[in-house]
Image: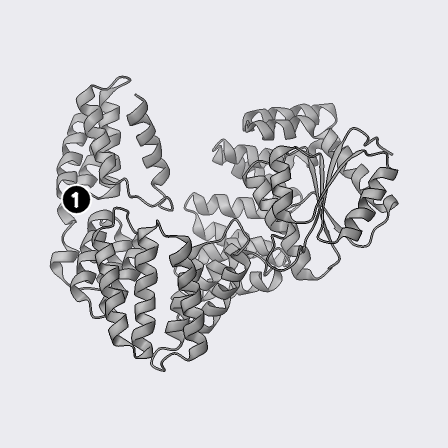
Amino acid sequence: MLVYSQKSFLIVDDFTDFRTSVRSMLREMGIKDVDVAESGETALRMCAQKRYDFILHDFHMGDGKKNGQQVLEDLMLDKLISHEAIFLMVTAESSQAVVLSALEHEPDAYLTKPFNRLGLTQRLDKLVQRKTLLKPILQALDRGRPADVLLACDNLCKQDPRFAPLCLRYRADALAALNRHEDLERFLKAILANRPTPWAYAALGKLLFKRGQAGQAKEIYEQAIKTFAMMPGLYDGLAEVLASAGETKRAQSILEEAVRLSPLAVRRQMQLGKLALNNADFDSASKAYRQAVSQGQNSRFKDPESNLGLAQALISKNHGNGLDARTRVEINQVLGDVAKEYTDDQGLQVRARLIKATGLAQAGDAETAAKLTEAAIARLDNMDQFFSAETALAVASQLQQLGQASAGSALLKNCVEVYGDDPAVMKNIAKLTDDPSILGAGNEAVDLNRQGVRAYQAGQLADALGLFRRALGLQPKNISIALNTAQALLRLGGEKPPLALLEECRTCLGKVAGIPDSDPRYERYRKLQIRAVSV
């Protein structure tokens, strides 16, 4: 038996008797540093103040409280737990839903109640032996140095080639972190050729999809599911690929299977709700969004989009039939939560009011609906943040349905200015309007931007900047054009750009400061902003 006397333990369970029992087991093992917590919230506060070597956390912590899965998510995201630490998920339940949901977040082990001291000791001994062997790799992970992870893997394999299988996933994750995509693809294919594993399938599917090889990614996920039908993450990947290809009904079906396997995942339920809503399957959408709202109450992944989605699904589900009292109460509750919890988010406030106005109009209260709509439009006129393209189109459609054609057209014009260089966005805008003054508003700017990109790629920086400036003059809020202009200014200015170029760059970035952090270009914006300020 290994020696644990110098290790620190935290026991988290809502039952006093269980905490006392496990503490006694640990005392018998010679362990003196044992803390206990009766809730996940308390455990998180304790972990913020003290680093534990071992955490034994019950999965279910009572209604309205964070469960073990959610606590593990928070510990990892906030970096309150080391890779060298051991997290054991403990539960009396052995149902598929609970086990798969717990294992998806990869605790070090899953321990079923009841257990005795011998069983606990044997499980801990195996985990400690493994983590001790992997210590250099785990330390490199804690430092956030993927290159050191690869080196540590190499050293471990040289020490004993039999350890190579232990290093496979660490190597793959490190290659991904270093953006060594070609090396990663070869590595993953070699693993799958030798011994297929679900994580390698998932990693390869994700990589191929990221590199624009959606067809190959689809084949990989489908092959993986045939072999590992109980791995919900594989279904998530396939659903994403299918949805991107426009196969939204099949994507919904695939995601429904993932939810059947592992239902306690907020983001999966939310994505299912979104797909079902887009597929006009309002019954399935309301069920999924309802689960996302409920499960999200104590989760890091709580998202007001689930509340808005649920309200919209309920209204659409009852379109033409009015709204019964129970449905009105549920809509008011979920939208009220958004209004109370996100008071500083102008966009959410506008959207919540418009959805509520739609519901009121459907319920026959036209007067109150009109007042809410007017209030929402007033807020919309004063907004300094950007909607995502998807959200802007949804809001424009709502405005049209509420009889606010002018406000809807104004929002569509703004959407063209911000996102008009994206053909997919323009295609969706065309579904809402045939007004040539809206659809053609960004054509000249988009063409100039395209010419600027070609000049930039050819190394003709001055010409590129001139083209970007002209395009930005026509569409000052276009995200792509503003970022291209800022990048060209910084590149042309060299290591120490003249003050005039820096000021122009900052002005460009200021025009699109409202870019949502969900936009794929947000990271590029952030890096350019940092450089423009720090130079």
Q: Position of residue 295 (x, y in %)?
A: 55, 59
Colour approach in the figure: one colour
Q: Residue at x 81, y 32 (%)?
A: 4
Q: In this view of the protein, can residue 457 be seen by the observer?
A: no
Q: Amino acid at mark 1?
A: Gln
Residue 365 horizontal/vertical position (percent): 29, 77
The residue nearer to you, when weighing 413 against 312, is 312
- On the image, which quarter does residue 159 sit in? top right
Mark count: 1
Q: Quadrant of residue 531?
A: top left
- The extreme top residue here reads 496
Image spot of residue 5 (x, y percent): 82, 30
Which quarter of the figure has residue 534? Answer: top left
Identify the residue shown where x is 46% and y is 73%. Answer: 283
| Front one among 351 and 195 | 351
Of 236 and 369, the residue lying toward us: 369
Residue 119 lies, in percent from the top left, at 85, 46
Q: In which quadrant will I find the C terminus?
A: top left
**Location of residue 219 with respect to 186 vertically, above or below:** below
Which quadrant holds the N terminus?
top right
At a point 19% along the width and 24% down the height, the residue shown is 501
Secondary structure at badge 1 equals: loop
Q: Is residue 139 visible?
A: yes
The answer to whether 65 is drawn above or below residue 312 in the figure is: above
Residue assigned mark 1: 475
- Say left or right for 16 vs 234: right
Other-residue count near label 1 (Cα within 10 Å), few / some / many at <14 / 14–19 / ≥20: many
